[in-house]
Every structure is written in C-alpha cells, then in structure tokens.
Image: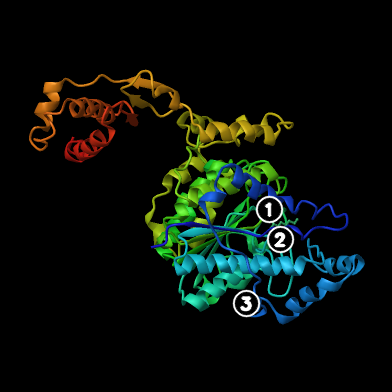
Amino acid sequence: MASGTVLIYDEEMTTHKLLWSDPICDIEVPERLSSSYEQLKCYHLVERCVHVPAREGSEEEILLVHSSEHLEVAKSTQTMNEEELKRVSENYDAFFFHPNTYRCARLAVGATLQLVDAVMSGKGRNGMALVRPPGHHSQRNAANGFCLFNNVAIAAEYAKLKYDLQRILIVDWDVHHGQGTQYIFEEDPSVLYFSWHRYEHQEFWPSLKESDYDAVGLGKGKGFNINLPWNKVGMGNSDYLAAFFHVLLPVAFEFDPELVIVSSGYDSGIGDPEGQMNATPEVFAHLTHFLMQLANGKLCVILEGGYHLKSLAESVCMTVKTLLGDPVPQITGEMAPCRSAVESIQNVRAAHKPYWKWLTYEDTSFLQNLSTKSNLLKKANSNLSTEHDSKITNSNENVKVERFLELHMKSILFPVPPIKTATTDSTGLAHFLPVAVHLVKEMDKTEIKTLVSGFYVDLVEDDKTLLSLGSMLAILDKILKKEVRNGIAASPTPAVSAAVALRHSVRFGFQR
Ligand code: X5A
Ligand code: ZN
C-alpha cells in the first residue's frame, strides 16, 4: 500500500536562465525553484518526503505530444551562441533559450514522468515535482509563455499508454490559461482539462477567444474542456473555493478520474505580478486536499508558474504539507465569492450543463440571487462580497506582500484562538503546551472503582493505577464535554493508564 509523498527536485533545472534583457521573460528566474526548495527544507517537509531522482524524458516520450520539427529546433539550441539563441527565441511568444534549456526541459519532462511512475506503481501515494521550464503553454509545434515542452500533457499521454488509463483529470490552477494543454486534448474525452485564468474579457495574455467559458471541447471531446475565465483581478480564497465547489468538484466526481495531475502554477496567489490575485497560501492546501479525494488519492502536482518568490514558496509548502497528510489550515476572512466570480461560475456551469448531470442536480439559485441583488441587500445578507479582500491589499498600494506573508504564515501555522489542551499536572507539563492549559481534577477513587470494576477486576486494587485512571478519565470527561480537544495526564504509571484510557474511550466515549 502506497503511503509516502514523493518529492522530485533537481538543481540542474536552475541553470536555464535569461541571458539578455527582456522585461516580459525576466520574471521566470532560477530562484523560483531554489527558494521553494529552501522553504520546504525550512518547514522540515523535505525530510518527510520520499525522494525520487529526476531523469531525462526520452525523445519518444516528447514525441507523444510534440512534432519532430519542434524537438529538432529545441535540440539544435544546445550548441548556439547568445546571438543565435536570441534569434530562435524571437520566433516564439515569450520564450528564451539558454544553452542548457534543452537539457533542463528534458529533465522537466522526465521528472514529471518519474512522479507519474512513482504514483502509479505505488512507490508513493502522491507527490510534487519542482520543474523548470514550465509546460502548459507549450504546443505541439511551439514554445510559448516560458514553456518548451508540455510536461503535464506528456505525462497524461504517457499514463494513458503505460498504465492503460481511460480517465485522467488535469487541474490547471495557474493564473494563465494553459492553451497548449487545451489544444492537445480538445478532442480527447479521456483527458478532462480544467483551467481557471485571468482573462479580463480577453484583455489578458494570451488574449485568446478560445480561453473563454464557451470553449467546451471539440467532437468526442465536447464537455471535457472546462475554462473558467476571471474577468477581474483580485480574486481571492472565496472565489477559488466557490469555483471548486460549484464547477470543478461536481464534474470531477462525476468523471471519476483514475489519476489527477495538477498544472500547479502559483501565479494565482497573492502578490504575484502576473496574476494580481489575492488568494493566500493556505487556499492551496484546501485545493490540494479536495483533489486528494479523487482517484484513490493518486495526485501528481507539477510546478508551472509563480513569480512572487515568497508567495510561491509558501504556497508550494502548503501544497506539499497537505499531500503529506497534515491538517489543512483554517481559511479566514470574507467567505462569499465576488459578483464577477459568480458571473463566471454561472456562465461555465451553463455552458457545461449539457454534458454533466451533477451540474443540473445542484441547486444554485442562491448564486443567481446573489448576482442580481442590490448592493444593500447583499450586504445585509452578507452573502456576496462586492469588493475584493480590501483588508489585505486594496487599501494600500504600498503594502509589502512579503511582510504580510511573514506575519500571515505565523498566524496560519499557529492558529489563534488555540486548541485547548487539558492537563492534570500544574507544574511539569504546562511549559510544553503552546496554548492555555486547563487544570482538571482527579476523580474520586471509589468512583473509578465503580466505573471499571466490570472489566478490570485485577487492576482496580492497585493504587497507582487508580490514580492514573483518574487522571485519564478526568481528561476524557473534558474531551467528551468538548471543553478541550486533547490532554496530558500526569501519571505514575503512564503505560497502564494510557492503555486503560484508550479502552475506555472505546467503551464509553462514543456511546454518549
Ligand atoms: C507558465 C507561466 C506565463 C507567461 C506570461 C507571458 N507562463 N506574458 O506562468
Ligand atoms: Zn502562469
């Protein structure tokens, strides 16, 4: 049974870099990878993962998606000088070649396939691959938007072939439309592609008509391409969660994928210069957690964009932490999607109603009402936020996202108000606890005897055991009354009392 979380990272992918000045491409820097990995180390997440080495994707694997012409052009750049590299790069919309780009792109493909193999073979339950260059803009015959080979698309074709999969879900939460991935699977009903993206009524790059909600797929693939265009910047946690609740998750559960692959761009997170969105790192923990409920947990997360180094790194950590099974942090703040988000969600739901019965069954009249109510009514019902997260960024242009995240992550990871922990010892244990401690009184010995005499006949004569039992039962009582979440009992015979308490929690606890 697969249990671990796989992490794939190869420092060599930091050698791909921009050699000349280009204000469009200069955000795609090697530090995106190295600083994310450093932050994973900082949170002690690296040591909790199963490490699988990257490898080069083979030519044959790249040709699953790309033309041999495209492969040959990419290959030919290995021996070029700067001037030649610049000239080839200019043939594409937002791409740069470095002499080691081809090697890095092959490692990015190979790392992605290694992750698919690890998850499909059961070496790991799920995992993440930190790769550069990214992939989702790359097309059969073209580099585009910092992407040379479409790592995720190749992985989907590879998984279909090698593991005979019939249904793969690709979730693209990068802030850009992965038009490359859309083109590759447009007619393919075995790959369900979902992408949300900054669109602004086609104003935002790549400014394509086919990024809108009415591009639902072609031929046999109709219904298997889902575009959720954001027509305003500043989308936040509530907008992303609403998109998951009301669009992606109903469809995904009906589709019932055998494998989920995430085109995991974090330029949809707060502070990103491209996305201009407001979602905080912990929302990615929730998105990850939802997707872990599909495909028996077989989830492969592949890095795409993300250009605010701090925001990117924290969001990567949130994702890996969740893959490892840690509890997801609470989301605070405005919990209603904004008007523009609701409109987009309604549009994509309407476009896909012919293809997915779960969209028909869900009653979303409440969303309809929200989008037509007056501002006053909306405020009164506190249903819908008309403005985005004003508390976080809108009020002050000069807000430093980095500073904000520094404080924010502390409050997320050590939430207040704290979970209450009980203890029966006032001196020894209190300093271990991060939160306020409630003292509980030991129970009366005869009381305990009466309680346990039915099944622990041989134990109840021992005084120490009775004391331990008393401590444990007192805490158990608090837990059952929901006054505390957990507790520590001071006890002369810890092993005995723990064992007895466990058995008691089974006997009594769940009968109340
Ligand atoms: C992978 C990714 C963005 C390209 C933006 C070009 N690409 N203006 O985020
Ligand atoms: Zn992006």
Name of the residue lying farthest toward the right: 83
Determine the image quadrant of residue 135.
bottom right
In the figure, 429 relative to 140: above or below? above
297 left or right, relative to 54: left
Q: Secondary structure at mark 3?
A: helix
Residue shown at the point (42%, 61%) measured from the top left: 2
Determine the image quadrant of residue 366.
top left
**Quadrant where the C terminus lies?**
top left
Q: Residue beneath label 1, please?
A: 33
Q: Note whether ligand 1 is within 8 Å of mark 2.
A: no
Tell me the colour scheme of the image. rainbow
Q: Secondary structure at mark 1?
A: helix
Front label number (1 vs 3): 1
Look at label 3 and name its amino acid: Glu
> Along the polypeptide, which appears first: circle 2 or circle 1?
2
* Mark 1 closeness class: few <14, some 14–19, many ≥20 residues within 10 Å: many
> Along the polypeptide, which appears first: circle 1 or circle 3?
1
Calculate the distance from the C-alpha at mark 1 to the C-alpha at mark 3.
24 Å
Q: How many marks?
A: 3
Q: Residue beneath label 2, please?
A: 13
In the figure, 227 relative to 459: above or below? below
Pointer 2 and pointer 1: residues touching (CB < 8 Å)? Answer: yes
Look at label 1 and name its amino acid: Leu
In the figure, 90 relative to 266: above or below? below
308 and 278: which is toward the camera: 308
Quadrant of the displayed image that contains ligand 1 = bottom right
* Mark 2 closeness class: few <14, some 14–19, many ≥20 residues within 10 Å: many
Calculate the distance from the C-alpha at mark 2 to the C-alpha at mark 1.
8 Å
Front label number (3 vs 2): 2
Q: Residue beneath label 3, please?
A: 61
499 and 100: which is toward the camera: 499
